[in-house]
Amino acid sequence: MSKEKVKKYPVPSVRRLPAYLRFLYELKAKDRAAVSCTHISDELRLDPTQVRKDLAITGIVGKPKIGYMVPELIDAIEKFLGWHDCSEAFLVGVGNLGGALLNYPDFKKHGLNIIAAFDIDNEKIGKTFQGKEIFPIEKFQNLASRMHVKIGIITVPPKHAQEIANIMIRADIKAIWNFAPATLNVPENVIVENVHLASSLAVLSSRLSELYK
Amino acid sequence: MSKEKVKKYPVPSVRRLPAYLRFLYELKAKDRAAVSCTHISDELRLDPTQVRKDLAITGIVGKPKIGYMVPELIDAIEKFLGWHDCSEAFLVGVGNLGGALLNYPDFKKHGLNIIAAFDIDNEKIGKTFQGKEIFPIEKFQNLASRMHVKIGIITVPPKHAQEIANIMIRADIKAIWNFAPATLNVPENVIVENVHLASSLAVLSSRLSELYK
DNA sequence: TAGATTGTTAATCGATTAACAATC
DNA sequence: TAGATTGTTAATCGATTAACAATC
């Protein structure tokens, strides 16, 4: 692991990459060989220069007058995101949302393989979701280090989110995908990516209430 | 509805408001009367000036040397977000995720009341989730206009997302909360708020792969 | 009063958008 | 060749952070 300053990619650009991919898969299905930024920007309603800059972070090089070769571009984005080889993840909290995530088959295409789940509820422990066994939370640390799992997904009630995060940190988890409505406190070498539905809802609500002013 | 230019609030600020609320509820439970920006910023790891500006959009006024009165501040944020009186919503697509959202009891505290759901699957139609009946999608337009529902939630597979969005638009839905991995095309007077797990995962993946460079 | 904290103006930073030269 | 499109530099815009006067 090099000590050189790692180049940081703009988060908004990274967030847009999956939308490009979705459109590119459609083009590929139609056997389109090449695509221009204008075409992409029209479809996704973005600025063409922005599209060019976003794609540039993946290292792709286009051809003037032609654009980008579709399969090459798909490959570059997938490689950039690390979606070619899956990372294995553990999920904690098999409630409504946790169960939904366990059952979601598409994460594998997105570089994420949830291989097991954990809970405190004896009703759930031992059961299997989509071939993924549910273990008691006590086994998290041991299994995580034995299987070298680096990603933890938190789908427990907010009251217990920090507690679970602490277990994950002790188990040397590198990245936490947090769905609990809670602000997690973690050491700075641990990555936290939050999915806060309340934040999304706040944007929706506030824009909606602007309408009626 | 006035034609004056509506003041736009910074989206990043709005996104942070729910986190403030969570912390404020904790303080209220501990009967803390007042709180300063510094206290909030320490807890949520934000810049104190940013906290002040974020709170200012709600119209709250603090007291020098004291800070903000906790119950007043909670009230101001909730009012700003329109979380005091719930908006009613219809959900389309009762799969894993849709079912999880239907079962999620906390949306009511966040100004959202999902009152019914829709699907195309005859197995599901007629069933009830948490007192919410599942109707055939054909009934969407009629029920939406009869009940003056203004929010639609899309949790169908991506292939059908645009089609459902079109139905919602025809039914005069004002805001769409979209969980389908698809870019929706809507007229500019319709609000779309996306929850794209793939985008969130992209940020997680790319940060994780930076670690191993 | 002195000092802590707000509210606001100014400076910085980063992302978006515009302009344009290079190139196939 | 002419023209479409890339890649890149410069300008703009908006959000974050710093500085500081007002105030209780």
Image (cartoon, coloured by chain):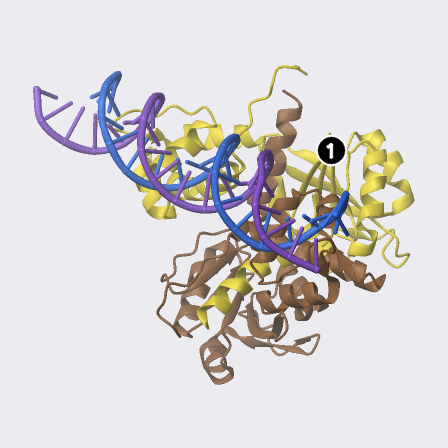
Chain colours: A yellow, B brown, C blue, D purple
With A184 as the anchor, is D14 left or right in this view?
left
Residue B151, given in percent of the width and then of the height, sits at 52, 70
Q: Residue at x 68, y 33 (%)?
A: A87
Left/right placement of residue B17 relative to residue B4 reads right
Residue marked by disc 1: A190
Q: Is residue B116 visible?
A: no
Q: Is residue B19 above or below residue D9?
A: below
Q: In the rendered image, is residue B109 in sight?
A: yes
**Left or right, residue B13 beside residue A115:** left
- Mark 1, secondary structure of its residue: loop
Q: Quadrant of the C terminus of chain B?
A: top right
Q: Nearer the viewer, residue A109 or B87?
A: B87
Q: x, y percentage for residue B164?
A: 46, 65
Looking at the picture, tell me which residue is in the foreground, B165 or A165.
A165
Snapshot quadrant of residue A153: top right
Q: Is residue A19 above or below residue B146?
A: above
Amino acid found under the numbered disc labelled 1:
Val
Mark 1 Cα shell of 10 Å, populated few (<14), some (14-19), many (≥20): some
Direction from residue B40 to residue A126 in the image, left or right: right
* Residue beneath the point at 45% across and 62% down: B191
Q: Chain of mark 1?
A: A
Provide residue B63's location: percent of width, then percent of height.
68, 58
* Location of residue A190 by image quarter: top right
Measured as percent of width and height from the top left, residue B17 is found at 63, 56
